[in-house]
Structure formats: structure tokens, C-alpha cells
Image (tube, rainbow, N blue to C red):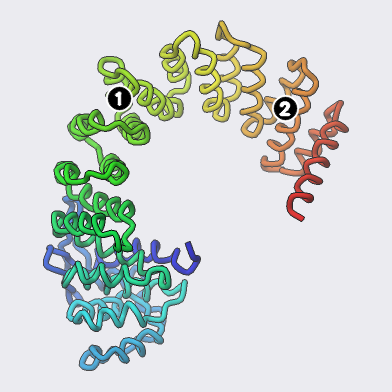
Amino acid sequence: MKKRYIPLWLASLCLAFFLGMLFKNDGTGLHIYPNNTEVSLEQQKHERAISQDDIREKNGGGDSTQHVEIDKESVQDPKQWQRLSSQQLRGTEQLSEMIALIVDADTRTLKSIIDNWKMEDSDLIGQMIVFAAAVRFSEIDPESALEYLNRGQEDDGYKYFLSVSALESWAAREPDAAIDWYLAQTENEESEVNSSHYVTRIFASLSQIGVDKALDALVRITSEDDRASAIFQITQSLNSPDDFEQMLYVINSQNNTSVDHTFFAHWANKDLTAALDWYALSAEGERKQNARSAIFNTYIYTNPEQAAVWYVDGASAENYESAVNEVVQRWAGQDTEATLLWVKEQSGINTDEAVFRTLEQGAFHSPDFVEQQLSTIANQEKKEKLALHVYRGYLMSTEGDISAQKFLERLPYSDAIEKRLAEEENYIDDFCY
């Protein structure tokens, strides 16, 4: 991704914030409210009353640069937009004037804004204007807007971000029509549309409307990859027990490990008890293994000791040691001492190897604790390898180089560690140069 296009994502967020304060979208387009008028904005079933004067007061009582007068009579002339793009527009009042012009602009003018507005990376207001023009274009004629924004993206990469925003806006207003368009693109061999990206954005928008709406639309998606992308987006919007129960039917109809992991990890994050209950009562086959892994990856950061017991108890005899190692890999970085105590309680495993793995994983997190355990490692080569990890752990600590150097001074075999460090430096130099 080219650096100049990255701020457009930030502009998108800022635009949503500004427009949320200045405009109300009732499905028929953007409507600007005049000064000193309170706006009732329904967003996620909450209403807020906001005044533009209040906004300016919070921003310091005015615009940060001199106000640019906008000629509303001649603004339909593309040259006028080019002139305006050279001005340093700042502040919510000037932004609201520009958006008011965009609301009344025709498609020719909107194209001119998108093509000719001269933006700098730091010009978030300018990027909001272009973003608003793309969304407005999609309100007037969504198919023409997307065709226009998809054309020549290889030469004008920011159009991709604009087309995504236009599609999300369309999907929120007319989800069935947006899906019809997407399906037509997937059947058109000459289409330049990246279907997986677009189906993701359509279902991100639909999921905000409601899980039921998104699930109803999902039946129309037949591509396995695109369906997985859509399910991923729907999953991120699940909140209530009913949502997860509905989604289970969809998950059970799939045969996709990635989809399973996404769903069960999100469920465990939202309602760990419900996910554990389902696993105990209903999980079976390959899906049970996928769910176990996904739930554990969330559980271990919630209650690590309980998660460790739950995970190894679910392992077969031949996989028990492997399960212990997975626990170590995720827990030792959080609490090396507690993990070490737990590991030493396990039976039927190579305890010396498990202890070494625990200390190795914990060295960056707890170099002081692992340093105290170095004497318990009998194998000199492993001891030196572990000491090297401890050294790096100290480097990452608050005192950095000082702590690392003091560690080497305390170490009886510091010469061996310094030799290893020198060999690594030589290898990096040879590799780079």
C-alpha cells in the first residue's frame, strides 16, 4: 500500500465523526442543518443533540485558518473546485459549506472533485471532501459510481478506498441491489473488482444493520472463499446468545477451519461460559478440535490455570505432551513462575524439556526470574542458549543496556554468551551486506 493512501482510512473515520455531528442521513441522502440548530442524530438507537456552535467552542472558538469564501453560484464549474482545492480549508463550518455543495452537485461535478482535488497526506479536511463526493455519487447512481471508481485503480490507488466507502453506503441503503451488483461482478471475467474485498465490505455494512439481515443475504453467496469472508464479518457483529445460536447453524453447514476458529474465538471472547457449555455438550468431530483450539486461545488469557487444566484434559494420551507444550507457549509469557509450577506437576512428559521450554518462553517477560533458574539446567549448551534469551530480555527492560551488561558481569560463562552475540552480529552483517 502506498504511503499517500494510508491517511484515507483515517479520513474515513474522521468523516464519519464530523458527518455524525453535522448531518443526518435518513436514507434519502445527506442533509445539512444550519447554524444554531440542534440536530437529532439516531445512531445505534441512541439520540444526541449537537450544536455546531458547541462544536466550534470545543475546538477553540473558531477556525484555525482564515475562512475561504465559497462561490456557490459558480461552484458547478470544475475549475472552481480546482481553485477551492488549492485553498487551505479548515474547520467544521467550512467543511459543512463544502458538503452542502456536494449534496447539490451533479455527477459530472462529483467526478471532477474526485479526480482533481489536490490532496496532501496531512489534509484530512480535503480527504473528507473527496470521500463525501464518492459517497454522494453512490447515492445518485451507485452502479455508475462504482464503475467509475473501479476504473484505473492501478494508476490511482486511492480510488479503491473511495469505492469501498461508496459500496458500504449503497449496501446500507439497498443491500439486495448491492449484492446483485457484486454477484454480477463475480460472473464478469473482465471485471477488475476484487470480489473478496467487496463482499467483506458489503457484509460489514449489513451486519451493522442486523445479524438477521446479514444471514438472509448470506444464502446468495456461493463462492466458498467469499462466503468465508462474509461469515468472518458477520461473526464480528455477534453479541447476544441468540446471535451465536443462529450462527451455529451456518457454521455447522461449513467445512472451513478458518471460519470455525474465527467463530469460536469470538464466542469465547464474548461469552466464555456459553462456549464452554456448548463444547462440553454438543461438540463433535473435526469441529470439536477446531473449537477446542479457538476457545483455549481466548480462555488462556482469562483464567490461565483453569484453561491449562481444561485444555490438557481434552487431549488424548498420545497428544498430552503436545498439549502441555501449547499451554507453555501461551502462558509462560504471561506468568513464567506460575507456568513452571504447573509444568512440574504434570506427569507422563519429558519434564526437563518442558521446564526448558517454559523458561525459554518466559525469558523476555521475566528475565530476572529465569536468570535465577539457569542453575537448574544441566545441559551447558541449553543453559547458554537460555542465558542468551535472558540477555535479550534485559535489553528489553526499562534500563536496557545497563541491565543486560550487569547480567553478563554476573554470569560465570559470559565469554560464551559474548561469543554467540558476536557470531550473530557477523551473520547479520554478512546477510545484509
Residue 272 at what x, y percent from top left? 33, 26
Q: Residue furthest top?
A: 348
Q: Position of residue 172 (x, y in %)?
A: 18, 57
**Residue 386 badge:** 2
Q: Residues within 10 Å of mark 2 (few under 14, many from 20)?
A: many
Q: What residue is shown at x 41% (from left), y 86% (from top)?
A: 86
Q: Nearer the viewer, residue 393 or 59?
A: 393
| Quadrant assignment for the C terminus | bottom right
Q: Is residue 240 above or below residue 18?
A: above
Could you tell whether 364 is left or right of 407 in the image?
left
- Residue 233 x %, y %: 29, 45
In the depicted view, which residue is nearer to us: 429 or 73? 429
Give the quarter of the image for residue 356: top right
> Rounded to the nearest whole Å, what is the CA distance between mark 1 and mark 2?
38 Å
- Dot 1 lies on which element? helix
Quadrant of residue 270 within the rendered picture: top left
Q: In this figure, which residue is indicated by the disc labeled 1?
A: 275
Q: Secondary structure at mark 2?
A: helix
- Disc on the earlier residue, 1 or 2: 1
Q: Residues within 10 Å of mark 1 (few under 14, many from 20)?
A: many
The residue at 37%/81% (across/down) is 117
Q: Which mark is residue 349?
A: none
Reply above or below: 122 against 67. Answer: above
Q: Amino acid at mark 2?
A: Leu
Look at label 1 and name its amino acid: Ala
Q: Quarter of the image holding residue 260?
A: top left
Evaluate whether residue 358 shows in this view.
yes
Visible in this render: residue 269? no
